[in-house]
């Protein structure tokens, strides 16, 4: 017969796992990869007609969108064009337009007209297609080594805060990818299998061990205490 | 044979808990990217210096970290990633292969060219005593044939074992306090073994990991000495446990007032009265277990011109401002009163909640990974209920009868808390910056665990069983949620 300790443990553990599972299923994420630059300063001030490019950007995962933070100097935002190009030839790979009228310090999510494949280097160019100045937020160049912002061919010594996106999917559906990523830069004997194993152990073996531990404690407490040691 | 079977049955709940905790610890070790636990790069730099060169970092040096560490940190974007929710660790296979080629070309010399101190002693960990880092040298050498990540993650897995020691010592501590009551002992041990912040910190490279078992053991042995009277054996064990804490981190000095009190009370009880000569004689040998290793470290540090403990300013260099200290303490625990000078801008609105509840229970990475607010409310209520319940249990069981043990435990808690506040106040006066972190209170986790067990002892029979089960279930859920949040932050 199960002890009260085991019963209450199972109730709390199962209820908690159900809630956690519901959150994981409902939590959609769209990040393909990011430059990892926190938005601390205007990384590219774009006057009307000017274009700033973050280049070169190694494409770690396929993406079809870009998110960035744009400042408008307390006025309505100008329309922008976003263009993904090859850094050397300038050939356009994907593009998008952002209509004007957005608020100051907005997080703008842009969907490109095609998907950019991984394994290549690209330039991410933002052009001010309106009549008022805008600024793309970012950080100093050291925020991401090996890539920089250029305006009119001049190095700005900054990096833009760019998040490269893909169609959103739930955290649960990304489990395999998460484990693959987590197994990189680990001991050579660790692969995604280790994370699958640990996940299985935590969701099955750990609660089983804890339940047995509680049961063993209940049994011990129900016995006479003579000769017991702390 | 029969005794062994009984002992095995008595320890079975603990052993099963430890196996579960070992799995959880392994998960924490492997899920967090390298150097994404507080100050882990500083501690790895110290450990590598000690392992490669055979001595701890000097006061100052030229190169804080080895070429190997710097290249690996660059490859995964460790500095950029720290506390930056916009960043993710490098997850490109091509970059990983590039790093492998680079480190293969560098060879083994790249491991040993760091000094762990840096120009002007820029590695803040350099002032720590060496015991934890020597402990970490074991897996470092065991994995010396592997690359940096092979060594770093084995060091983490090895460090995570310390939380198991802490849980086992807490089991004994609760048993000493409340008697052999396995359900309550299990509850106490589980609070330590499954507390998310304790496991996260223990599963990283950080000397705080060694403080938790050292404090747990000291608390257990201190109560034992007080209850059973001082002997050479239990006194020496108590002093040795305190020495381990001191040689792991200067925070361990906070144990000394409590240890001296325990030795005095235990000596008094063993001698059957107040006999100074007898007390000195009984304490002398045990104190050697404290004085010899700590003295040896202090002498070595002095001879080699190293700071033996962190140097903290003296309150602005002038007279100590008692009114300022009072104002600081007030605002740490209570809302700002009219007329008080506010704390610096870096402080949260109520530091006690931010540091001692949220930071103590669960803020991960470089503290940028947090739980949903309701979970902090839940652990805050659990903490408050444990402290109040333990107080009620103490009064019910006879405050006078247990006054000596209570005084010892309160003295240990106040010494650590007082030391942290005094240090922070002095740093505030000197540099106007925040010092305290929730993890600095983790050495008191075994005491909280004992408070939880004592509070649970107020319930009887099936109700107590049900509460113990619910507590362990809650801790398990906290672990799963924490690991999921950390995994999503870094890899989704």
Image: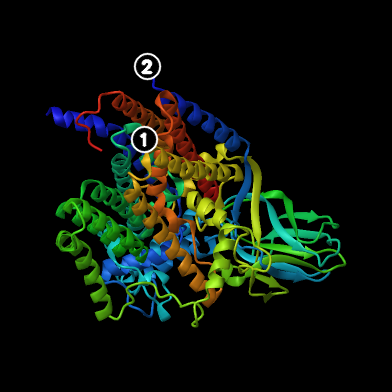
**Element type at marker 1?**
helix
Residue indicated by mark 1: B184
The answer to whether A191 appears left or right of B247 in the picture is right
Residue B208 place in picture, x, y as percent = 38, 58
Where does residue B210 sit, x and y in percent of width and height?
Answer: 33, 56
Give percent across and percent down for residue B114: 35, 73
Find numbered disc 2 in the image and state the secondary structure of the residue it sits on. Answer: loop
Q: How is the image coloured?
A: rainbow
Give the numbered dot on residue A1.
2
Name the one closer to the observer, B271 or B52: B271
Please state which of residues B362 and A218 is positioned toward the viewer in this rendering. Answer: A218
Q: Could you tell me which chain the residue with mark 2 belongs to?
A: A
Q: Quadrant of residue A35?
A: bottom right
State the residue in front, A214 or B448.
B448
Give the residue at the far bottom of this rendering. Answer: B318
- B368 left or right, relative to B53: right
**Placement of the N terminus of chain B among the 4 image quadrants:** top left
Q: From the viewer's perspective, is residue B76 above or below residue B168? A: below
Foreground pick, B359 / A72: B359
């Amino acid at each position: 017969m199960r002890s009260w300790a085991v019963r209450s443990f199972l109730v709390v553990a199962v209820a908690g796992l159900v809630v956690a599972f519901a959150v994981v299923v409902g939590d959609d994420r769209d990040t393909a990869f990011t430059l990892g630059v926190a938005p601390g300063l205007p990384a590219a001030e774009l006057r009307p007609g000017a274009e700033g490019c973050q280049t070169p950007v190694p494409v770690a995962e396929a993406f079809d969108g870009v998110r960035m933070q744009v400042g408008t100097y307390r006025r309505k935002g100008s329309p922008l064009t976003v263009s993904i190009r090859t850094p050397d030839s300038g050939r356009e790979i994907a593009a998008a337009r952002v209509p004007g009228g957005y608020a100051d310090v907005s997080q703008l999510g842009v969907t490109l007209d095609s998907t950019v494949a991984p394994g290549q280097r690209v330039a991410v160019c933002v052009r001010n297609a309106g009549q008022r100045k805008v600024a793309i937020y970012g950080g100093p160049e050291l925020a991401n080594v090996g890539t920089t912002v250029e305006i009119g061919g001049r190095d700005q010594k900054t990096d833009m805060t760019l998040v490269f996106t893909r169609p959103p999917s739930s955290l649960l559906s990304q489990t395999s990818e998460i484990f693959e990523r987590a197994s990189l830069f680990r001991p050579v004997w660790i692969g995604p299998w280790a994370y699958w194993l640990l996940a299985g152990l935590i969701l099955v073996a750990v609660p089983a061990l804890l339940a047995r531990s509680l049961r063993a404690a209940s049994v011990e407490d129900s016995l006479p205490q003579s000769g017991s040691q702390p | 044979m029969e005794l062994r079977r009984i002992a095995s049955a008595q320890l079975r709940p603990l052993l099963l808990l430890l196996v579960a905790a070992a799995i959880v610890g392994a998960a924490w070790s492997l899920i967090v990217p390298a150097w994404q636990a507080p100050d882990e790069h500083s501690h790895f730099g110290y450990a590598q210096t000690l392992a490669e060169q055979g001595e701890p970092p000097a006061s100052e040096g030229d190169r804080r970290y080895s070429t190997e560490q710097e290249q690996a940190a660059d490859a995964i974007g460790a500095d950029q990633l720290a506390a930056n929710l916009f960043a993710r660790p490098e997850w490109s296979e091509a970059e990983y292969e590039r790093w492998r080629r680079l480190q293969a070309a560098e060879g083994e010399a790249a491991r040993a060219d760091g000094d762990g101190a840096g120009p002007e002693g820029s590695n803040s960990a350099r002032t720590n005593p060496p015991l934890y880092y020597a402990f970490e040298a074991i897996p470092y050498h065991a994995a010396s044939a592997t690359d940096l990540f092979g060594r770093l993650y084995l060091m983490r897995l090895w460090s995570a074992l310390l939380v198991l020691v802490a849980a086992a010592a807490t089991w004994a501590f609760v048993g000493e306090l409340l008697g052999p009551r396995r359900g309550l002992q299990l509850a106490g041990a589980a609070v330590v073994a499954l507390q998310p912040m304790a496991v996260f910190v223990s599963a990283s490279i950080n000397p705080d990991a060694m403080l938790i078992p050292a404090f747990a053991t000291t608390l257990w042995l201190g109560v034992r000495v007080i209850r059973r009277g001082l002997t050479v054996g239990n006194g020496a064990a108590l002093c040795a446990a305190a020495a381990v804490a001191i040689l792991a981190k200067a925070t361990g000095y906070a144990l000394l007032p409590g240890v001296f009190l325990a030795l005095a009370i235990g000596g008094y009880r063993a001698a059957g009265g107040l006999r100074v000569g007898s007390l000195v004689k009984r304490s002398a040998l045990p104190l050697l277990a404290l004085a010899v290793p700590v003295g040896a470290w202090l002498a070595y540090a002095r001879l080699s011109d190293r700071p033996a403990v962190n140097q903290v300013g003296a309150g602005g260099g002038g007279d100590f401002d008692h009114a300022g200290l009072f104002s600081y303490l007030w605002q740490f625990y209570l809302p700002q009163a009219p007329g008080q000078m506010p704390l610096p801008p870096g402080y949260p609105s109520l530091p006690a909640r931010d540091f001692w509840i949220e930071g103590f229970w669960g803020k991960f990475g470089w503290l940028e990974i947090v739980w949903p607010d309701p979970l902090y409310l839940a652990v805050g209520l659990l903490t408050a209920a444990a402290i109040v319940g333990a107080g009620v249990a103490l009064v019910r069981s006879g405050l006078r009868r247990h006054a000596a043990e209570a005084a010892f435990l309160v003295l240990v808690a106040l010494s650590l808390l007082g030391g942290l506040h005094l240090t922070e106040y002095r740093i505030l006066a000197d540099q106007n910056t925040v010092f305290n972190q929730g993890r600095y209170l983790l050495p008191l986790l075994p005491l909280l665990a004992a408070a939880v067990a004592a509070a649970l002892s107020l319930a009887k029979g099936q109700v107590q069983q049900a509460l113990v089960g619910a507590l362990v279930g809650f801790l398990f859920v906290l672990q799963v949620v924490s690991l999921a949040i950390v995994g999503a932050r870094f890899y989704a």
